[in-house]
Amino acid sequence: MRERNLITLVIIVVLGLFAAFIVSPIPKPEFLKSLVFWQDPRARDLQIRQGLDLQGGLQVLLAANLESSQLVTGSLESARQIIEGRVNGLGVTEATVQIQGTDRILVELPGITDPQLAIDLIQKTGQLEFVNGTNNPPQAGQVISTTFGLYQGLLYPATSQIGRPVTATETPPGVLVYETAFTGEILESNARPDASTGQIVVLFQVKPEAQASFREFTSRNVQRPLCIVLDGIVQSCPIIQDVLTEGGSIRGNYTIDEARQVATLLNYGSLPVPLKIESIRDVGATLGADSVRRSFIAGLIGLLALIIFLLLYYRVLGVISAIGLTFFGLSTMAVFILLPVTLTLPGIVGFLSSVASAVDANVLVVERFKEEVRGGRTIRGAVETAYQRAWLSIRDSNLSTLIICAILFLFGNTFGASAVKGFAITLALGILISLFSAMVVTRTILRQVLYQQSETFEARKALLGI
Amino acid sequence: MLFSIVQNRRYYFAFSLVVILAGVIAMLYNVITLPTNSPWRLGVDFREGSRFVLKFTSPVSEDSLRSAFAAFGLSNPSVSRLGAPEENLWQVRTTFLAGEQNESLLARISETIAPLDRAQSSVDSVSPQVAREVASAAVLAVLAAIVAILLFIWYSFRKMPHPFRYSLCAILALIHDILVAGGAMALLSVILGWEADVLFLTAMLTIVGFSIQDTIVVFDRIRENLSRYRGEPFHQVVSRSVVQVVHRSVVTSLTNVFVTTALLLFGGNSIRQFVAILLVGLIAGTYSSIFVAVPTLVAWEERSLLGKRKPSPQALPAK
């Protein structure tokens, strides 16, 4: 029994030291970072992640601009993936793009300093280009470099209609660069599949202001391929059959579904659903920082006062509780880093609530212990009884809070209330760890100390605050 | 003294009623007078429109801000100063604007009025639909939590006589705490113009959690003592249980009060309102577990809401 307790104690000490190491600002070795393989490779820095409200950034809630009956199953998910790809292209680490409910997408870009850039990126409907296929057209699905993609940047300026010509010096060595003839901007967004001639084709129209250049290009390139390229990926390379001005039709042995897809692509670019902005939050980078720093210090002062109180009131038991609580705090932080959990202001509140639960669990046990000793039990007997009896209260009260967390998590997931979700996650994790710390960690230390020194404590109960 | 809690319940009930009534009146006042018809002044999370928090690097006047917004067709924005005058921090609320409009507006203001410190400014825009949905989701979440807790306590006290009474009394204490904290917020909405935002929601959720925890601890003790002291009358067992857990209740709420008070005194501005409401709720939660949940349980058992006027002569002497 005593030996088993000692082994548990050693395991706890090792766990505690590991948690302290993870939480500490000491730089972590690379191999340790690669161990957290489930995290985004670019963000494996083993640091606490701060949410938008703490470090500033941009949060955009988008909604499908369609009646829900028109929304095709899976189209929202593909829109989400496309936006995620673009956002990743921005180089924002820790960006999240999530589906909310049935018709919304929530985009969070922490640390973004130019909101307009990001909004453009999200809302613009994907980069559609018409690329001169030359005599050696690329295969569908192939990723190619285009003059537009290389030299016009990620965002498409609303005014330009034609890709810039490239000079030899600008061409990266060894890469075949295709000439962008037009971008998707030249099209009216009314492309549609058509089967009236017996063959399924996609009809499209060119905006009046671009018709002259469209005519000029097609007359130069009759019987040559013109590739439809979306975000750098070749979709198909139909052959220009004739000189075109106002528009035309694309023939490609389409089924009606494929034709519809191509039409959607021409209309909306890569986004299979048109999206409108429902809410935007643009938080200044240092707006919350001062407040957070002050609150952090205030929280530390409060916790210090709490620990001093426990030490004075519970003496030796207070010391043990304080050790248990320190273990709880460190390991919860470590779990937040390892999972990872992004800390927002509501998330911190959730964590603080779990601290309160952890303290309460300790107080319940200690008060019960004192009661049992006063009631005439030996110190050893009192430890075990106190844990047995207090466990019921601790279990029931924490279970009720966990149930609340589960409900809040569900609501936070279903509706646009992500703040509630952050609160529920940190609170639930904190409570699970506090249960472990009170029922295993504090108990093990308590046994170790009280069993070995039970004669001393029997003689001098004042040490236990009794 | 504590032994008379159950006997003197009329006074505690009266006290709670007075406090709750004050809050309810404030909430009704808000429902009637506020354009949103809500019990509290609603913050950005629950209210449609755009909110600009603007940090200027040099002093500006309210009129110049108004005219800048008017140039964008926003004729009647609500403009208010945040913090001390030398901070040059302003809040402007308008109807819902999205995307590019926000940016060009900010650029325009920065050019024409005074340079903006973008790192300390923020813009929140919420469409009417989202505002409505988030607000109703919040209310639904709290209601669902209450129902789940009702069932949970019912289940966990299923071996006791009348388990449903325990869960209903716990919920009663919980509603008591929500009304006290919500009432405090409504009063402060009226007096100081405080706005209910998502932090207020988390404060209410925290209060719900703590209230239930406190009540369950007392009820658990009653459950334990009922099987141990079988011969004793119900109210006596209950009083005994309250005496036994009161130490824990006091210590736990003291520790909570330490942390919240420190946050209230030294913490940042952005969480002050939240902490104040939390503090009110925590105190209400501890109070209600002993002075509302327990006396109601006994009142139900004795089928007498207010109890006898005099303490029963065979009350146990304090141990």
Image (cartoon, grey):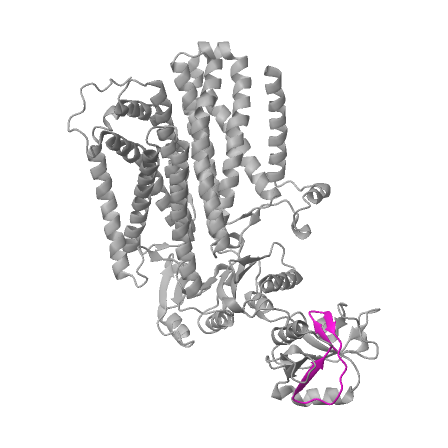
Vertical side of A289 occupied by A243: above or below: below
Vertical side of A151 occupied by B182: above or below: above
Q: Is residue A307 visible?
A: no
Tell which residue pokes out farthest to the left in this image. B309
**Residue at horizontal 37 percent and vertical 38 percent from the top:** B211
Vertical side of B142 occupied by B169: above or below: above
Query: What is the quadrant of residue B37 in the picture?
Result: bottom left
Image quarter where the C terminus of chain B lies is top left
Q: Position of residue B160 (x, y in %)?
A: 36, 28
Magenta residues, start to end: A227-252
**Residue at horizontal 61 percent and vertical 76 percent from the top:** A267
Horizontal side of B160 relative to A92 (left or right) equals: left
Residue A167 is covered by the magenta coloring = no
Q: Position of residue A311 (x, y in %)?
A: 45, 25
Q: Nearer the viewer, residue B81 or A175?
A: A175
Q: Nearer the viewer, residue B5 or B150?
A: B150
**Residue at horizontal 69 percent and vertical 51 percent from the top:** A41
Q: Is residue A229 visible?
A: yes
Image quarter where the N terminus of chain B lies is top left
Q: Position of residue A274 (x, y in %)?
A: 56, 70
